[in-house]
Amino acid sequence: MKRLVPLLLLAGCITETGNPELVVDVALLAASTARTIATVAPDTEPGSITVDGAWVRIDKVRLVTGTACDAPGEMEQDLPGLGVVDLASGTPAVTSGAATEDDYCRIRVRLQRGDAGEGPEGFEDHSLLLTGTTAGGASFRLRSRDEPDIDVRSRGEPFTLDEGRADLVLAFDVGVWLDGIDLDSGEAEGDGTILVDEDHNRDLLDAFEDRLDAALELYDDEDGNREVDEDDDLLATSG
């Protein structure tokens, strides 16, 4: 995948704290660390769920400086929101903005319900819509109105953003989201589609929403290809 936005260093731009500013590039996408549970199309695995659409409305992406989470001295730095994006489209959604060269303990992402006319059919007043094929081969549509403020934390030492590390990948792990969710147990509509929302198969929605904020992973995108590679360092997780 070609790199779409070059890494820029804002030379001579200094914050009030004395730290220089960088342009930080965060690519957001759907991925899976458990292919036996779920994959992202066009990748498939026999007997697993295939996700071909992962629509979310991203309200905020916020970087939080600090040597430890929830400790005095934290500072928040917001990157632009993205609106409604399909994380499974094959083209990562990207937010870029200025941030200080500093130590960071976490990144926060807030999902928000879509307005009329935003996203695909059925997305209005929902924050997330997953579509695809169940392990048994049935079509499914899962949508949620939940609006979590997801905390993706370093697990140990903080991670540093500087001139050598300003490209990040934030992966939404469908293998974690759908772990233990037996979509094939849901009651299907007349056309065979399994709907999961507040009015259909509510038990499956409740099980999914219990995992909604536990599936994000932040990686150092070392080669800037906006993909999760084996040599990309895991910086923080929400699980």
Image (cartoon, grey):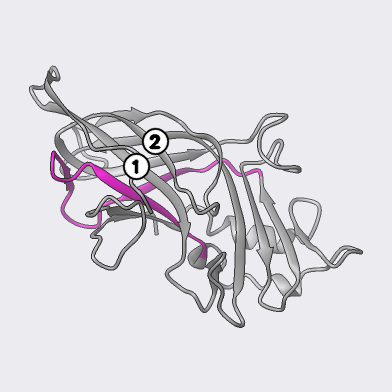
Residue type at tag 2: Thr
> Residue at left 62%, top 54%?
53
Which residue is outermost to the bottom?
Answer: 46
- Residue 197 horizontal/vertical position (percent): 74, 53
Q: Secondary structure at mark 1?
A: strand
24 vs 238, nearest the viewer:
24
Q: Residue at x 30, y 50 (%)?
A: 153
Residue at the spot 48% in from the left edge and 38% down from the top edge: 110
SS class, disc 2: strand
* Residue placed most toward the observer, 196 or 14: 14
Report the magenta residues as a range: 145-174
Q: Which residue is mark 2?
A: 95
Quarter of the figure with residue 121: top right
Q: Which x, y percent locates residue 67? A: 15, 43
Quadrant containing the C terminus in the rendered view: bottom left
For the residue carrying disc 1, how many other residues have a C-alpha within 10 Å: few (<14), some (14-19), or many (20+)?
many
In the rendered image, the quadrant that contains the N terminus is bottom left
Q: Is residue 161 magenta?
A: yes
Q: Residue at x 27, y 52 (%)?
A: 221
Residue 222, given in percent of the width and then of the height, sits at 22, 54
* First reached walking from the N terminus: tag 1 or tag 2: 1
Asked whether 173 falls inside the magenta stretch, the response is: yes
Q: What residue type is disc 1 on? A: Val
Is disc 1 in contact with disc 2, using a CB cutoff of under 8 Å? yes
Residue to which mark 1 is pinned: 26
Q: Is residue 98 found left or right of 192 in the rendered image?
A: left
Q: Position of residue 48 (x, y in %)?
A: 59, 77
Mark 1 → mark 2, Cα distance in angstroms: 5 Å
* 153 relative to 141 in the view: left or right: left
- The tally of labels here is 2
Q: Quadrant of residue 223?
A: bottom left
Q: Could you tell whether 113 is left or right of 72 in the image?
A: right
